[in-house]
Image: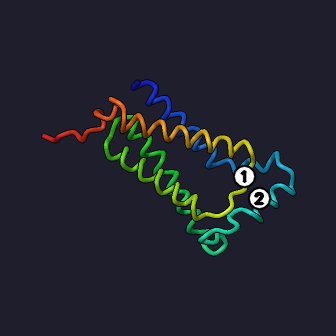
Amino acid sequence: MDKVFRQLVLASVFLYTFVWFSPYFSYLWMDENVVEMLVIYGGYGAVFPHEQHSTFFLIFDAVTYVGFVLSSIGMLFFQAIARAIFTLLIVISQVMVLVSGTVVTIEGIAFLESVLSMMDGAILALAYLSPLSNRFSPRSVG
C-alpha cells in the first residue's frame, strides 16, 4: 500500500504541474478563435471578477501550486503537517471552484482535472482511512 500511495502522490504532482502550466503552451495548437473565447468567458459570473483581482488570483494560484508540491513531497515522507496542509489546500481549492464562475478550458485539460480530483480523493483516503494513516503520527522529539 505504501508503494501505491507514493505512486499516486508522484503522479498527482506530475499531472498537477502539467495542468497548471498548460495555459502557457496549449495555445500553440489551438485555433485563434478558441483562444479568444477562453479569454473572454473564463471567470464569467465569478463572485470575485478576475479582471479586478487578476494579480490576486495569479498569486493565489502560484501559492496554491507551490503548497501542493511541497505538501506532496512532505507526504512522501509521511509528515503529519504535510498531510494537514494538503487537506487544507484541497478544501480551499474546492471552495474556490464555487466562487470562480464559469471555467472555460479545453477538453484534455478538463479530463486531467477530473482525474486529479479522483487522485486527490484516493490520496486523502489512503492518508486518513488506511493503515498508512498511522505513519503520519507526529513523531516525539527527544
- The secondary structure type at the circle numbered 2 is helix
For the residue marked with disc 1, what is the amino acid?
Thr
Place residue 59 in its image quadrant: bottom right
Q: Residue at x 83, y 55 (%)?
A: 34
Residue holding disc 2: 38
Choose between 117 and 35: the one closer to the eye.
117
Place residue 133 in its image quadrant: top left
- The secondary structure type at the circle numbered 1 is loop
For the residue marked with disc 2, what is the amino acid?
Leu
Q: Is residue 51 above or below residue 61?
A: below
Q: Compare marks 2 and 1 and give the one earlier in the sequence.
A: 2
How many numbered marks, from 0 up? 2
Farthest residue in the bottom direction? 52
Type of colouring: rainbow
Q: x and y percent of residue 48 in the render? A: 59, 71
Q: Is residue 61 above or below residue 136?
A: below
Q: Residue at x 41, y 53 (%)?
A: 88
Q: Where is the C terminus found, in terms of image quarters?
A: top left
Residue holding disc 1: 105
Q: Badge 2, how many Cα within 10 Å: few under 14, some, many 20+?
A: some
Q: Residue at x 72, y 52 (%)?
A: 105
Q: x and y percent of residue 9 in the render? A: 48, 35
- Between the C-alphas of marks 2 and 1, the distance is 7 Å
Farthest residue in the left direction? 142
Residue 72 located left or right of residue 31: left
Choose between 75 and 66: the one closer to the eye.
75
Q: x and y percent of residue 139 in the render? A: 21, 39
